[in-house]
Image (cartoon, grey):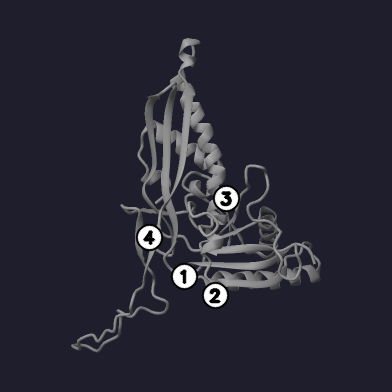
Amino acid sequence: MLLRQISPNDDLTRVVIEALESTAPILKDLKDAQFYTKAGSSDNVKKAAGGHSGNATFRDLNEEPTITAGERTYEPVAKKILSIQSKVDIILEKRGEDPESELVVETRNDAMEAGWLLQEKFFKGDSAVNSKEFDGLYALVPADNLIAEEIVVPTGISDSAMSQQQIALEKLLQFISKVRGGATHLYMPEALKIRWLTVAKNLGYYRQNKDELGNTIDMIGDVVIRGAGRQKDGSEIMDFNETVTNNDCASIIAVRWGERVDLTCLTTSGIIAEYLGQVGKFLINSVDLDMAIVLQNNTALYQWRGWRLNS
């Protein structure tokens, strides 16, 4: 489920969610981050089995099934809290203004600011650096699922360029297939996204779809292609600043989103937005989101470092 489907449906919460989605598009797009609810400070996540199921077998007619159930491992995942607090001075009422309306505007603005931070942390959050934040996709990629190999995705329609494009596309499709069941999304820098969509159109692999809200979805085959977005200062969250052999490489992250399976998001009840009333000289709105990203199945998240636009 989307965050807005889990959260309460009151006016204040709707204002906050709309503002968050405007700067954190990973929450807005209907096929991206999927949430599930669980009470408490954490969840003891039942990890997916690594191979084929241990609790299924073939049997003959009238034969009792002989099943050796595979052992499941459990991994605790702690929720982290993103908080917003908006306030306005009650002196506004003495000046003939409406402090309640101003508080709504202030809350919307603060939620938009928080959205920039949340979008970044979906990718770059690292609890080893800051124990108060949840782990993002970079931190969650299992070591065995990290590929480091340089691949150039060239432009042009010459025989040489198209030959290189075909090789790069084959590599990309192999990468997608590493995700068990197939990746649902690829995340990458915006410039690399544009290059890939151009190449996919040239080679006949580009598809375009519409979501339930009429938004355009760019796809290569059956996989949604997304840019990772930008930080508030305009810099890209994913950029060509990584080094494999050369120092102008970027990553592509392959994801299979699901609800309580594969890669998913944990929360208690979504956005909790409350009007606290007057505290001292201020009217205050308080907003909290407790959440974590959960890698329930290690095969649902891969990263390839080494994608380049130039030879």
The answer for how far apart the CA atoms under marks 2 and 3 are is: 24 Å
Q: Given the image, on which type of amino acid does mark 1 rest? A: Asn
Disc 3 secondary structure class: helix
**In terms of secondary structure, where does tag 1 sit?**
helix
**Is residue 222 in view?**
no
Whether pointer 1 and pointer 2 mark residues with C-beta atoms closer than 8 Å, the reply is yes
Instruction: Name the residue at 55% across, 38% down.
Output: 113
Secondary structure beneath disc 2?
helix
**Residue position for label 2:** 144
* Three-letter code, disc 2: Asp
Give the residue pinned by disc 4. 260
Q: Position of residue 106 (x, y in %)?
A: 51, 28
In the rendered image, the quadrant that contains the C terminus is bottom right
**Residue 53, position as x, y percentages in the image:** 35, 78
* Residues packed near mark 2 inside 10 Å, few (<14), some (14 to 19) or many (20 plus): few
- 191 horizontally vs 106: left or right: right
Which residue is label 1 attached to? 298
Spatial separation of the CA atoms under disc 4 and disc 3: 22 Å
Earlier along the polypeptide chain: callout 1 or callout 2?
2
